[in-house]
Image: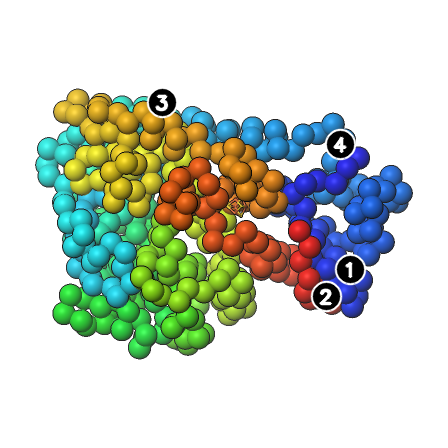
């Protein structure tokens, strides 16, 4: 037997104990110093039977003839070319009603197109053609602010829900909205289609109101809170993304306490660093970003205060990018097709455009193949990285912005150890009862 190449070790020098976490199988096993040394000294055969069984079950040690990189490739390709879910992100408009200080979308002013009727019809045909034969259709509305044009959103949903019913498919509907335009009628419709909504806050009330303003400069905290109350009353699924940078990092505690006081104690929360231009993130030029260890700390604090969190949910830096799946497309207001939600700002990433019949034409095969075939095992720097099974090579757009090529590492930090530690603490708290596991050994 041999040691898996995807093990990360968390050591507690005082108690001489260690947690081994395997990123491929997301398994955590507690071992003592002696077993740790035997693994590291390639003396696995000397480990006594009971411990060895546990290590084998967690895939911490594996058969000598197992090539894990090949197994990982199979795993990635299974996800990439699955025939279960067809996913589409629709950007009905690039316009926005807010003027957040840190918005990389330029407050809806850099791009401001909105879908015309003709494009809506083309989009519907395109989705139907691409999704037929899949078990599930997943639609995500993204912007700009999609609810500036609720008629477009609900027209598409009505047609798509007829389509899935006729073809006996499952339907999933998600939306990222700033949460300031929700009326009772909109809430009713979101409920009707079983929507799962992402809302955004940016720190305690004072700080949020400075960062996320409307075009007149008014803060929006109370409006988002009202929307949360409406959703709670109507039982509409939602989670809150908290955008964090050095300015508001220290106010997150206050925010969480305020949410608890207002009765939102058990909701799902995800933390996202401002100035990482990845999906669901916004960018402030010159912002002082917080590192992954700080984000991991916020997940821990929120978890301790009773919120639902998953530290691996630092979207796509840790979970891998969904846009790399063969059956995933983003459609912008002009009917142009991309893989990534953030790509409509870069014409070189456009895959093609949709014609009257719902076919993609003017195809940029180079872009299509590059995006679809992006694979961390073909990227120098990611190939031997212990985090590649959970990170998948990180965000392709970050890689492009940093290195001019999506086929390069898309991480800000190559060490996701703190995130993994927060994840284990949350999922196996008993392992931390007597140990702190301060040191991380990759
Ligand atoms: S490439 Fe990056 S920004 Fe685009 S969908 Fe993937 S993770 Fe999100
Ligand atoms: S090098 Fe960075 S992007 Fe590549 S797999 Fe490792 S953590 Fe992810």
Asked whether mark 1 lies closer than 8 Å to ligand 2, one says no
Q: Which residue is mark 4?
A: 63
- The tag earlier along the polypeptide, 3 or 2, is 3
Q: Residue sitting at 35 percent across and 65 percent down?
A: 287
Front one among 12 and 301: 12
Tag shown at residue 17: 1
- The tag earlier along the polypeptide, 3 or 1, is 1
Asked whether mark 2 lies closer than 8 Å to ligand 2, one says no
Disc 3 versus disc 4: nearer the observer: 4
Quarter of the picture containing the N terminus is top right
Q: Residues within 10 Å of mark 1 (few under 14, many from 20)?
A: many
**The furthest residue to the left:** 117
Q: Residue sitting at 18 percent across and 49 percent down?
A: 111
- The tag earlier along the polypeptide, 1 or 4, is 1
**Label 1 to label 2, Cα distance in Å?**
8 Å
Q: Residue sitting at 22 percent across and 68 percent down?
A: 213
Q: Which residue is mark 2?
A: 435
Tag shown at residue 133: 3
**Label 3 to label 1, Cα distance in Å?**
51 Å
Are circles 1 and 2 on residues that touch, CB within 8 Å? yes
Provide the secondary structure element on which disc 4 rests: loop
Q: Position of residue 405 (x, y in %)?
A: 40, 39
**Label 1 to label 4, Cα distance in Å?**
25 Å
- The tag earlier along the polypeptide, 3 or 4, is 4
**Label 4 to label 2, Cα distance in Å?**
30 Å
Disc 3 versus disc 1: nearer the observer: 1
**Label 3 to label 4, Cα distance in Å?**
38 Å
Are circles 1 and 4 on residues that touch, CB within 8 Å? no
Q: Is residue 316 above or below residue 80?
A: below
Asked whether mark 3 lies closer than 8 Å to ligand 1, one says no
The quarter holding residue 367 reads top left
């Amino acid at each position: 037997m041999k040691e898996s190449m995807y093990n990360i070790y968390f050591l507690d020098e005082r108690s001489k104990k260690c947690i081994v976490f395997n990123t491929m199988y997301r398994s955590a096993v507690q071992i003592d110093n002696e077993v740790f040394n035997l693994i590291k000294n390639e003396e696995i055969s000397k480990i006594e039977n009971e411990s060895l069984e546990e290590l084998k079950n967690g895939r911490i040690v594996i058969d000598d003839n197992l090539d894990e990189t090949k197994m990982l490739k199979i795993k990635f390709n299974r996800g990439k070319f699955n025939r279960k879910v067809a996913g589409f992100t629709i950007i009905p408009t690039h316009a926005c009603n807010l003027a957040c200080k840190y918005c990389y979308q330029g407050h809806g002013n850099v791009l401001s197109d909105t879908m015309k009727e003709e494009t809506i019809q083309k989009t519907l045909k395109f989705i139907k053609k691409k999704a037929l034969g899949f078990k599930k259709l997943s639609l995500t509305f993204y912007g700009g602010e999609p609810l500036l044009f609720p008629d477009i959103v609900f027209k598409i949903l009505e047609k798509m829900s007829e389509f899935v019913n006729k073809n006996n498919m499952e339907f999933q509907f998600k939306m990222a909205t700033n949460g300031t335009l929700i009326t009772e009628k909109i809430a009713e419709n979101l409920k009707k289609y079983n929507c799962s909504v992402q809302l955004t806050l940016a720190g305690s009330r004072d700080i949020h109101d400075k960062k996320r303003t409307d075009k007149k400069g008014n803060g929006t905290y109370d409006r988002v809170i009202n929307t949360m109350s409406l959703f709670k009353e109507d039982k509409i699924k939602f989670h809150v993304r908290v955008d964090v940078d050095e300015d508001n990092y220290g106010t997150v505690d206050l925010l969480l306490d305020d949410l608890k006081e207002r009765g939102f104690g058990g909701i799902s929360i995800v933390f996202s660093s401002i100035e990482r231009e990845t999906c669901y993130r916004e960018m402030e030029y010159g912002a002082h970003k917080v590192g992954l260890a700080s984000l991991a700390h916020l997940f821990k604090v929120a978890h301790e205060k009773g919120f639902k969190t998953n530290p691996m949910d630092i979207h796509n830096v840790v979970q891998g990018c969904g846009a790399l799946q063969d059956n995933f497309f983003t459609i912008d207001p002009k009917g142009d097709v991309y893989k990534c939600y953030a790509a409509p700002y870069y014409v070189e990433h456009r895959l093609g455009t949709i014609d009257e019949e719902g076919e993609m034409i003017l195809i940029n095969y180079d872009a299509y193949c590059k995006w679809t075939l992006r694979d961390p095992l073909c990227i120098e720097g990611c190939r031997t990285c212990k985090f590649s099974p959970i990170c998948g090579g990180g965000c392709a757009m970050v890689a492009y912005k940093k290195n001019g090529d999506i086929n390069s590492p898309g991480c800000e930090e190559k060490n996701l150890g703190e995130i993994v530690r927060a994840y284990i603490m949350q999922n196996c708290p008993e392992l931390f009862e007597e140990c702190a596991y301060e040191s991380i050994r990759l």
